[in-house]
Image (spheres, rainbow, N blue to C red):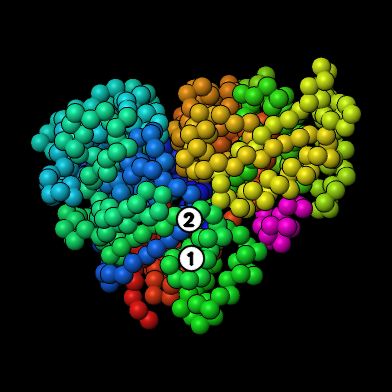
Amino acid sequence: MRSEFFTTHLRAAVIVGLSVFGASSMAEPQHGIAMYGDPALPPDFVALPYANPDAPIGGRMVEANVGNFDSLNPFIQKGNVPWQLRFVYGETLMGRSIDEPFSLYGILAESIETGPNREWVEFTLRPEARFSDGSPVTVEDVIWSFEILGTAGHGRYRGFWAKVDSLEQVGDRTIRFTFNEENAELALLAGMRPILQKAQFDGVDFAEEGDKIVPITSSPYIIDDYEFGRFVSFRRNPDYWGWGVVPFRAGTFNLDEYRIEFFGDETAAFEAIKTGLVNTTREFNAARWESQYDFAAVQDGRFVKEELAHQRPSGMTGFVMNTRRTQFQDWRVREALLTAFNFEFANEAMTGSQQQRITSYWSNSPLGMGHGPAEGRVRDMLMLYQDDLLPGALEGYNLPQSDGSERNRAGTARAMELFEEAGYTIQDGVMADANGTPFTFDILIQSGASETSTIADIYVESLKRIGVSANVTQIDSAQFTERTRAYDFDMTYYRVGVSLSPGNEQYLYFGADQVDTGGRNLMGVSSPAVDGLIGEMLTAESQEDFRAAIKALDRTLMSGRYVIPFYQWNITRIAHDANLHHPDYIPVLGDWPGWQPDVWWYEEN
């Protein structure tokens, strides 16, 4: 029942079947755009393939979040916002299909046109587009939104804005972006930024005062009611301008109410499911799924359990080491801490060994690295940066593996050897450096994250066997967000999602420019090889080079030994009210933002 964001994954067969990587030129306005070739749906498509345009309207969906929130503006850095908010409450020029590698179709924009090499992109607004207060969405609103988000908005928007050379109105309803670098993805990213109402923020310091404002958007849902820290309720807007106008919206947002209830911990959240206060939940703990979902509502059929296959790469989940801290700067120390982590024992304790371990950032996908010596184009790309590589990148790298016993004797011995190689020895039972300074660190986790807390406790016990003292600090969600954004931690829970169409966001996750700015490069990696391989990926002119660059990047990150990986989820487990329904057709990304609550509906059985 975790509320963390999901990882992306695309169908391998779709990628394998792509004959050309890169942009195809668009000679005239189109209804959609794809990163690879042409979008799958024709101009006259009626609805997305994973939506039901005949779905009934009504009912409600209520889900649980563990944690807290103090803002309803997801478009600025300030404040702690429910993660779901920007996916159901921020209308964009175009919408992303979660059944294709990377394709967009018009929402606020009725058409898109690009230059031959995507050096510019134009969007023409639909004349019907309206904000929820009835005022029109104008070119002025679009230009202001990009400027304010790019300069004063959340960090996720600023990288794109730095690549815009000019933004101008070129027609009554048309906006043109001209870019300052060759990057075919930028035309698509421009279509995915939220459009806000300029007039609402007139005279307001957007970055500092915006957390006190509920933004007016043009979305199908409006925020109807909320109480900070307790709940937020979205209501379907019957006057939404796009009903019957936008094919992308057909069969979506069918529920009258979508509500998020907040709880202090996972135990309270689970009790809310059992009592019916919450009527849908995702379960990430396989053992709990098997043993505790036997309450009355499940037994009598009022609640149903579904296991849905998805085809997303694993991404990375685990404990990340902050290499800005002196004690984590030696890769041998990081390898020692990885070796001391007894995954096999923890996995048995937590899931009954039912979950597979994450083995790389793109594991469980065709872009995942090989674990033997690098070959072919992957090796060629790594050799460009060989002076910056750590052991394992070229030779092959595998995570340490224990025998599954609690004592993990072999792993413990190897961890101590690695510490000794890095200049540490056991002194009076304590791991310490040559000056006698003990090796200690703090593990920062969010209050209420009981699963993560249990794993941390198991890890702390393992570390004691090698003379390392680790302290677990639990703080509320607002403090956790603030401290991780500021990189104010030694080790912490980490989650990053990746896809089979990775792009500029990789710089946000792993780029050297993010080391000192505060953001998502929690590990503090600053590597010419990492930055260079992201660049190779973005400028690849063939599918072969694209894949090779990602596999090489995956090797470089894994051999960097920055994260202690947990387990992955290759299926989605959802328990829900039997009156909540979704189409039988499951999109490539499966349960992902854009699927629940978007294409669900309520209908009594």
Q: Residue at x 33, y 22 (%)?
A: 180
Residue 145 is situated, as x and y percent measured from the top left of the image, at 25, 34
Q: Residue at x 51, y 70 (%)?
A: 274
Residue 317 is situated, as x and y percent measured from the top left of the image, at 60, 45
Residue 263's disc is 2
Disc 1 marks which residue?
Answer: 272
Res 44 quadrant in image:
bottom left
Q: Looking at this view, name the residue that lies furthest to the left.
A: 172
Image: 79 above or below 353: above
Q: Residue at x 29, y 22 (%)?
A: 165
Image quadrant containing the C terminus: bottom left
Residue 473 is situated, as x and y percent measured from the top left of the image, at 62, 39
Mark 1: which amino acid? Ala
Q: Residue at x 72, y 36 (%)?
A: 470
Whether residue 175 can be seen here: no
Asked if residue 498 lies in the magenta stretch, the reply is no
Image: 93 above or below 54: above
Q: Which residues are magenta?
A: 343-358
Disc 1 is placed on an element classified as helix
Mark 2: which amino acid? Phe
State the residue in front, 316 or 396: 316
